[in-house]
Image (cartoon, rainbow, N blue to C red):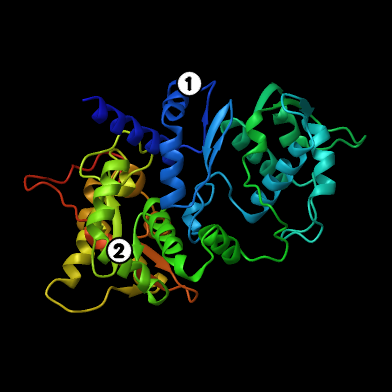
Amino acid sequence: MEEEKVREEIREAIQLLLENRWLPRQQMPEEYFLVRRHEKRVREYFRDKCGWPLLVNARYYKLEKIPAEPRPFMGIQEMQSPEDYALLCCVLAYLEEQEVEGMFLLGGLCEALLDFYPEDGIAGPLNWESYNWRKALIRVMNFLLSEGVLQVIEDESEAFLQRGRLPDGVYAGEALYEVMPLARVFLRSFSRSFQGVSVEELCATTLSQGHEEEGQQGEARRRRVYRELLLQPACYRHGENEADFAYLRNMQRRVREELEERTGLMLELYNDTAMLVSHERPSWFRDIFPVRMRGLHDLILHFATQVRSGLAGTEESLPVWTEAEFQAQMERLKAGTGSGWTKEYRDMGLKHLAEALLAELCGWNMAEVDEDGLIHVRPALLRLCGSYPSDYRAKPERDGEKK
């Protein structure tokens, strides 16, 4: 009985580290001490299976979840452009020069960023006279506040957002921030300069670190497979990862049992697709598919049924559409099932509807857009289907409301 309790606690500790960017002791004491009790075994598991280091501090735990290959959906949702990411890195560089629990003013940060931000940036040099630049900075600061990297003491930044810099050079509005310990570990640390090093080279280094010898290449493959399974909604077989799928097929039983015991998720392996799923809604995921009361996921379930019905009894490959053809699919979907959608999507124009649905499909690896703008359906979409109950009747149209 005691052994079973230990296994459950280790599973919960692994789930917590997978789901959260970090576990700060002050804000999450129970979770922090749970990981602490099983720190050695948890650290060994992630190091062996994924090659991920577990950062340990008296104030926090952080698992460095490094992907085998970066994907667009892994970005920070609050960041809306490359300029946002550049500003984020510049702010973090500024914080490196500040003392932990030290304070700074928004105006001082703005002045420093003029030196930190590259003059040949994508959107040109930094300019606080631009509302878009000011809005981007406030977006970055709000994100860092939500992550616990900063703490706001006084905030009058709304005036800065609206007016920027006054004619006398003083910034309209001000804010006082405190630097939290997590500011030091938001970005990964590297033992060498990565100037001129590609993202692919950085990922390859973390996969093979400590396993460079030819006879130990299997270690790097195992790490890559586990990273893909744990960080992606679905993994697909292609020319470059044939060996990874061969590894999964050969080690299928062991990998399935191990992942189920450690994460509570089950491995589904097909000819060219692998994914981790849960037949019951796990309590530790913040974002799952489908999410109840999220109208867009209802649309995707109906869309999956529509695509499946189009392939029934045929040996055709998965559909590939132009943007116009995809919008035509949305028109057909709306005509057939739109009466039961939430008002937001019933009233949405076809173009915006297609954009919203496509973005969510790509985020869940159910579709992708190639370099030519063609939309490819991915196998994960066909894992799903949805339909109205047999006794469903379209809701009557209300006054002033469209079906």
Task: Give 287 or 396, whichever is nearer the viewer.
Answer: 287
Residue 47 in the image: state x and y as whole percent.
47, 48
> Residue 105 is drawn in which quadrant?
top right
The residue at the far left in this view is: 391
Which residue is the site of mark 1? Answer: 29
Name which of mark 2 and mark 1 comes first in the sequence.
1
Is residue 94 among the parts visible in the rendering?
Answer: yes
Rendered position, 88 above or below 374:
above
**Residue 245 or residue 335, whichever sits in front:** 245
Query: What x and y, as percent, mark residue 46?
Result: 44, 46
Is residue 174 something that shows in the picture? no
Kind of element beneath mark 2 = helix
Q: Which residue corresponds to the image point at 55% horizontal and 60% vertical from the top-left?
A: 203
The quadrant holding residue 378 is bottom left
* Identity, as a three-letter code, of the amino acid under mark 1: Pro
Q: Nearer the viewer, residue 35 or 172?
A: 35
Front one among 334 and 46: 46
Where disc 1 sits, the SS reads: helix
**Residue indicated by mark 2:** 248
The residue sitting at 12% across, 45% down in the picture is 393
Q: Position of residue 291 (x, y in %)?
A: 30, 41
Residue type indicated by callout 2: Leu
